[in-house]
Image (tube, rainbow, N blue to C red):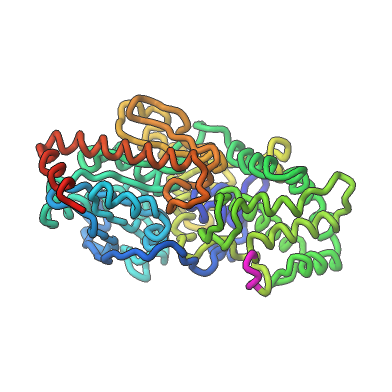
Amino acid sequence: MMAGGRSLEKIAATCILTLCLACLHVTSLKSQLFTRVGGLRYTTEPPISYKTLYFDQKIDHFGFLQDGTFKQRYLVADKHWHQPDGPVLFYTGNEGDITWFCNNTGFMWEIAGQLGAMLVFAEHRYYGESLPFGQESYSDSKHLNYLTSEQALADFAVLIENLKSTVPGAQNSPVIAIGGSYGGMLSAWFRMKYPNVVVGALAASAPIWQFPDLVPCGDFYKIVTQDFAKSGNNCDKNIRRSWKAINNVSSSASGLQWLSEEFSLCSPLKNKNDAVTFKSWLQETWVNLAMVDYPYEANFLQPLPRWPIQVVCKYLGFDSTVSDHQLLHGVAQAAKVYYNYTGSSPCLNTSQTATSSLGALGWFFQACTEMVMPMCTDGVQDMFEPEEWNFQAFSDECNSIFGVRPRADWAGTVYGGKKIGSHSNIIFSNGGLDPWSAGGVTSNITQSLVSILIPDGAHHLDLRYSNNLDPPSVRFARALELKYFQKWIRQAQKSTGTGSTMSKKRKNSP
């Protein structure tokens, strides 16, 4: 690991999973960079039906020499759509396979009937099946050069304009952008950059301020720590102690063997570097748990019990006199809650923490170019080993891997940083349990740039299917989001003179 930096290998699942957001770390373990993903997890929610379509997109919207096109995949569900001029709810695809996000965004499916809306889920370029250069898309940085958020937003805008001009009855349909995590960032930026295309946006768990000099780099891990501290006695304290215990035990060959057996690792730890990777894997595990600390059994990243951190913390209630081996026995049992809740895994794979439907390599390139999200730990206000944010080390590692260097301030320049008060009609929803809220908008900016806080919510809980165990705060959030959607739709239809027609159609519909 390069001194003073956070490893890219280490951040693989942290970024990737949540949608993969912050590539904060730096490492020379390139062979492990892009492997921390597992098998695709399928939702157990009600079956849904949609059409899979493809649109010829320009590879480069902002230049004129590259005139090639590629097939952008998008999914359409129009069962509830009121024609003509019914609204369109448009999901701004994240860094992964669009079918995965489609299956996990139950909120859109549940309100489509109420709004008489068409649902469109657009895949982000370079992810899933939407590969600008086919199998060559990831071959080198020259082919990756068109993987930017700006190009993706232009894809969305061109796709919507095409739908409006080719789908009968859609010409005057108001479009609302919806997204979660990086997709939520895109939905907010989409409304900012293309207010002529979308009338409003819901940006769920969208850390649009997790960029240099906008928020403290340590706040993300503070929230992770707070989640564990409130979920069990001494839970965070024992995780903080565990790093030194791992160092002590892993200092001998017998200790490495004991750790491998205690954690039921698929690949035994053999040396000091393996121990470092092992600690990174554990750190990612605790972060992942904070993001998916849902009030019901869920299968978003791994099959988990309801309030999984509370279950984890039952194994970490030791006092300060506990031995290293006793402590790490508890840590092993806690880790198995995340990786083997169903009891079906014969061993734990330290190279996998998240679903394969998320695009690791593509996100790393984005982090190494424009999505520079600083993070750090101090071991005092958080439960992790101290690591500073070192931009130069991060830049050097990006250069060694991709031959490019990140532009630290570009996102703030192109999207406005905290100076976004001139925009309108954007909802920023954030969960109090979600570490990504550290970089999110958590208070109202204007009357139409509003914040909705969900104190008991983890990562974009409001976008998930409703559940009988949902806390009142997320039920309220969804109801309020729906009211804003209805307001934006009325305003748009009034401006185009389609409102009265739509009202009559709804009255005549079952």
Q: Would you say 283 lies left or right of 320 here?
A: left
**On the image, which quarter does residue 4 sit in?**
top right
Q: Which residue is located at x 61 percent, y 65 percent?
A: 351
Q: Where is residue 385 drawn, in percent x and y?
A: 72, 45
Above or below residue 72? Residue 215 is above
Q: Is residue 311 magenta?
A: no
Q: Where is residue 141 drawn, in percent x and y?
A: 41, 59
Nearest the eye: 436 or 176: 176
**Range of residues picked out in magenta:** 341-345
Q: Where is residue 240 drawn, in percent x and y?
A: 75, 45
**On the image, which quarter does residue 58 sit in?**
bottom left
- Residue 142 in sight from this viewpoint: no
User: What is the total number of numbered labels drawn onto the structure image?
Assistant: 0
Q: Which residue is located at x 80 percent, y 50 percent?
A: 244
Q: Would you say 112 lies left or right of 269 here?
A: left
Q: Where is residue 292 drawn, in percent x and y?
A: 55, 52
Q: Which residue is located at x 85 percent, y 58 percent?
A: 325
- Residue 158 in sight from this viewpoint: yes
Nearest the eye: 97 or 371: 97
Above or below residue 49? Residue 234 is above
Q: Which residue is located at x 54 percent, y 64 percent?
A: 37
Name of the residue lying farthest toward the bottom: 346
